[in-house]
Amino acid sequence: MELAEVQVNAARPSSLAGVRNPFQKWRKLKEKIIELCLLTSAMTSVVVVFTILWILVSESIPFFQHVRLIDFLTDTEWTPLFEQAHYGILPLLCGTFLTTLIALSVAIPCGTMMALFLSEYATPFWRETLKPVLELLAAVPTVVYGYFALMTVTPLLQKLIPSLPGFNVLSAGIVMGVMIVPYVSSLTEDALRSVPNYLREGSMAMGASKAQTALRVLYPAAFSGISSAYILAISRALGETMVVSIAAGLKPNLTLNPLEPAATVTAFIVQVSQGDLPHGSIGFQSIYVAGLALLILTLVFNLFGFYLRRRFKETYD
Amino acid sequence: MVEILKKEILRSDVRNLSFSYGDKKVLKNINLPIADNKVTALIGPSGCGKTTLLRCFNRMHDLYKSTHYEGEIILFPEGINIISAKLDPIEVRMKIGMVFQKPNPFPKSIFENVSYGLKVRGIRKSSFIKDKSEKALKQAGLWEEVKDRLHQPATSLSGGQQQRLCIARALATDPEILLLDEPTSALDPISTAHIEKLIVDLKSTVTIVIVTHNLHQAARVSDSTAFMYLGEMVEFGTTNQIFTNPQQKRTENYITGRFG
């Protein structure tokens, strides 16, 4: 019986029957065009990534025909521009790791504490005052930070450590950390503020203090988002170029001592690309290899971040 | 009003309590005795102030700006005024537990949830924490279901189990009063029945104040009932009297479903 009714309904002619068809066709076409536009713009990022990857790999292949991979990974000297050329990536990676580590040990504690203050403690007045200042910190050009490290922070540190050379990893790392603080604090604050209020109230109702609530409930509850903040900080620090080029010295140095000068992967790339090495020479190709190494490193950290985000994901509704 | 309960021992007494958000007075001159080891239900239509009143007992309003209390809520046997500005709200919350409308377990393990109150009180002795947590989980009727998975995340429990975990979490610190804010409104009928039974069982150990929208629930679990309307206490009496012989017309209309 129900079926019969449906048939009757279907058979009834639509009052819009005349207009419907051409309009419908045009609408469908428009829909297709829009979809294509959106897909194209989405694809550009993919195309760019793969183009970069392809260039890095294709320029690296001739390099590895000259230099054995094992030498590249284990040689303790990086002197591609010398007559007695050595191509060990370790000194550069070491410089990159060291500056990153110093930057993170500044940026993560400072950024996290700032975020906790802004999201849990600050009165509207303090929030309105501090946030624009933090945003300003992120707007300072990196080259300015570089000279700030070289001309201001290093002399200050030299008062504490008289033996500190003019170019050193410590000063560059600290300033890089300050530079990254706004990224950490703003993403961490967003993550903390997205923790639903019922967890805050639940913890306070148990007799917890504000600090206990923030550290024992809100921080773990927001950790998925906070881990993205930390991973972004790591990526920024690994890829940072200007500050280390200016303030850390450009001397590849296999050391874990932050009081010495060192070169990072990025600093080396800048140095070579500004020089007058002929294209296609081994020395020039070495910057592509260094770039590839850096890209792989960043990729590893991003994957780790992806894992962290999923591991600590809490869904709130 | 108080005469009805004069044979009971009082755990708390609300005296001329008014409460306002900014300029807006939402509780007007409330008087309410809370009998020891009994269940007191607060009923009334949405917006009547029953949850606001409940949240006065553990000073939850202090978390927000421009809230203002007047009057007294005396907590016995100490005889302290809970809402006195001189009293640290955290101290009040250490004495008075609360369970919310929506189960809100912390994103931690089941065990960490139950032991949270003890940990924030600075208790470190792990054997003590273990015993207390186990006892609280047993009181909340959850022990048998979770004893083998204490270290799994609390969010892996069902809604009803999560709410019982929240009750256990509140019980672990031996509260003097347990506040329940519509504890079953987000739960299915079976979990609701489970929690209602639990409330009746808990009466022997803790004083309970429950806010509920569900009149049947109030009738089933409570000993005395207060009917509130537009921020005022309209009528208070034994649950039996309120539901069978209300003295006020407005109470009768609400109970019989004519408004609200």
Image (cartoon, coloured by chain):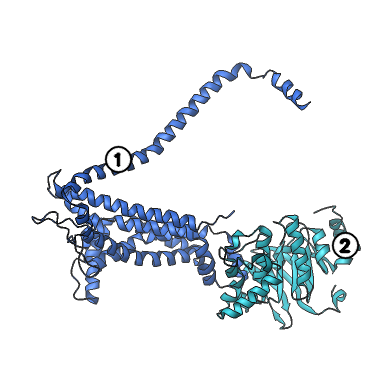
Chain colours: A blue, B cyan
Q: Is residue A309 left or right of residue A296?
A: right
* Location of residue B22 by image quarter: bottom right
Q: Nearer the viewer, residue B191 or A135?
A: B191
Residue A7 spot, x, y in % from top left: 72, 22
User: Where the N terminus of chain A falls, by quadrant?
Assistant: top right
- Which is nearer the eye, A30 or B250? A30
Residue at the extreme top of the image, as rendered? A18
Reply above or below: A15 against A44.
above
Answer yes or no: is residue B215 visible. yes
Residue extending farthest bottom: B78
Q: Position of residue B28 (x, y in %)?
A: 75, 66
Amino acid carrying label 2: it is Phe
Q: Secondary structure at mark 1?
A: helix
The image quadrant of residue A148 is bottom left
Q: Residue at x 85, y 72 (%)?
A: B1
Chain of the residue where label 2 is placed in the rendered structure: B
